[in-house]
Image (spheres, rainbow, N blue to C red):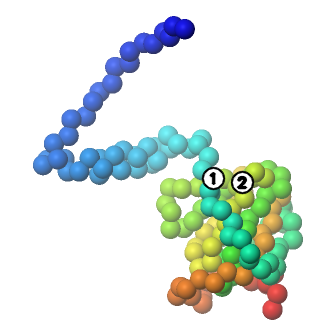
Amino acid sequence: MKYNCEKEKTDLKILNPDIEGDASEVIEEEIEETIEDDKLADVKLYDNLIFPEGLEKVGETPWMNEQNVFPDILKKHMAPKDKLGYLIVKKGELEFVWEDEKGKVYTVDAKHPLIIYPERYHHVILKGPVELKIKFYKFDVDRVKDISALRPGEEFIKK
C-alpha cells in the first residue's frame, strides 16, 4: 500500500531557556492565546468524571425547559450544602461553566450528564430548546461553607 504524503513547511521555535524561560510557559501562553482567539470555540468539552456509587438520593427538580427553567440556575450559584447535583439533559444541549475554570465551557446533552459538586460556583447557559433536570444526592465534603451562596436547588432537598 502506498501513501502520498506532502511535506508541510513549519516554522520551528528555538528556545533559549536562559532568555525565554521554561518551554512549558511558552506552551501555556500559546494555549491561552488559542482559547482567547476562539480557535477552539467549536470543540465541545465534556466532563469525564464518574458518578460516585452508593449515594442517597435526597431530591430533584422537575423537568425544565428553556421557557420554565429556574432563572437562578442561569446565574452564578452553588449546589445545596453537602449535596451533589447530577445534571441530566433529555433533549437538546446546554453549556455549563464552573466560575473558577475560566475559558472552559462544558457541553451537557443526553449522552453527557454532569456532576455538580457542592460549594463551587457555577452557572448554566441555554443555547436553544432543551429539557433538563437536576437530581441531588447526599455528599459529605470537608470544606468551608459559604452560607451566603445562592442555591436554587435547596428547596428540592428532603428536610
Residue drawn 49% across and 60% down?
A: 102
x and y percentages locating residue 5 in the rendered image: 45, 13
Q: Residues within 10 Å of mark 1 (few under 14, many from 20)?
A: some
Q: Mark 2 or 1 closer to N-term?
A: 1
As helix, strand or loop, the secondary structure at mark 2 comes to loop
Residue drawn 26% across and 47% down?
A: 23
Q: CA distance from mark 2 to mark 1?
A: 7 Å
Q: Residue furthest right?
A: 62
x and y percentages locating residue 34 in the rendered image: 43, 43
Q: Is residue 21 left or right of residue 49?
A: left
Confirm whether residue 78 shows in the render: no
x and y percentages locating residue 27 in the rendered image: 34, 46
Confirm whether residue 35 shows in the render: yes
Quadrant of the frame with the C terminus: bottom right
Q: Is residue 60 left or right of residue 78?
A: right
Residue 157: name its quadrant: bottom right
x and y percentages locating residue 10 in the rendered image: 33, 24
Residue 112: name its quadrant: bottom right
Report the amino acid beneath label 2.
Answer: His
User: 153 above or below 52?
Assistant: below
Dot label at residue 46 = 1
Quadrant of the frame with the N terminus: top right
Report the amino acid beneath label 1.
Answer: Tyr
Q: Residues within 10 Å of mark 2 (few under 14, many from 20)?
A: some
Residue 149: name its quadrant: bottom right
The reply to whether discs 2 and 1 touch (Cβ–Cβ < 8 Å) is yes
Report which residue position mark 2 lands on. Answer: 112
User: 52 above or below 65?
Assistant: below
Residue drawn 20% across and 51% down?
A: 21
As helix, strand or loop, the secondary structure at mark 1 comes to loop
